[in-house]
Amino acid sequence: MYRFLLTPRWMGINVFALLAIPVCVFMGVWQLSRFEGRVDAQRAADHRPDPAKEAAAPLGSLLPVTQQSSGRQAEAAGHYGDQFLVPDRRLDGRTGSYVLTMLHTDGGKALPVVRGWLPHGRPAPPAPKGEVEVVGALQPSETTDTDGVIASGGLPAGQVGMISAASLVNVVPYGVYDAWVTANKGAGGLAPVPAAAPENTGLDLKAFQNLGYTGEWFVFAGFVLYMWFRLVRREAEAERDRALGIEPAV
């Protein structure tokens, strides 16, 4: 009765099911591992000292930015150069702009420094002249998924939509660190910008999306298995009817 499973048509169905089920299970396990990784990261963060209270370290010792060094107090020295506004950034429920100034360091690259937040309509204060020392929270370059980023372009001269080395090298004629610092103290009427939590950590919406995708992949695996059994049963019943001289209904 089940010899039909060896026909070319059913061999194709069998191969599809044998490949689809492991793939769905693998993807479900992978998404579950991502969720568990975020849980572990959250537990580690709960037991980690507040990075803002740790002693400041030289910029070079904290690069490249990792989940462990993100938010750490970094210190750098140099002189300020080009200055930009980063529009449509919110602070305490209000919308304004970050004042982003490039700090030229002895390392040959410039460090983007957010000197503070400015309400709409107010002019940005000029950066201090001469050699300066900056201490602030280290942050990774922003991406298109970062809240507040304007990735569409078309901003007026003197504005950038993303604090990222990849975007800043297109508007300045020198190298830029793949990181930025938000200064601890605002000056000239600027409000200090608090450090953001490292991306891809903590039990945020994305973490629970991973958990939801886990369930979806396991459901897909179960659905493929269910449909295979259902097709086999229907075909077996048709073969039995033919053996009894009963033509199955079309």
Image (cartoon, rainbow, N blue to C red):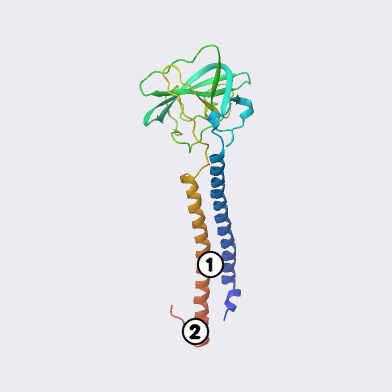
Q: Give x and y (percent) for residue 207.
A: 50, 47
Q: Amino acid at mark 1?
A: Leu
Q: What is the x, y in percent for residue 204?
A: 47, 44
- Front in this rendered view, residue 153 or 117: 117
Distance from Cα at disc 1 to Cα at disc 2: 25 Å
Q: Considering the numbered disc 1 on the image, is that residue within a helix, a strand or a loop? A: helix
Q: Residue at x 59, y 78 (%)?
A: 3
Count the numbered circles shown: 2
Q: Would you say 180 lies left or right of 90 here?
A: right
Tell me the residue that label 2 is attached to: 241
Residue annotated with mark 1: 225
Work out whether 183 lies above or below 239. Answer: above
Disc 1 + disc 2, Cβ < 8 Å: no
| Closer to the camera in the image, 136 or 112 | 136
How packed mark 1 is, by other alpha carbons closer than 10 Å (few <14, some 14-19, many 20 or more), is some
* Residue 188 locus on image (x, y percent): 43, 16
Q: Quadrant of residue 173?
A: top right
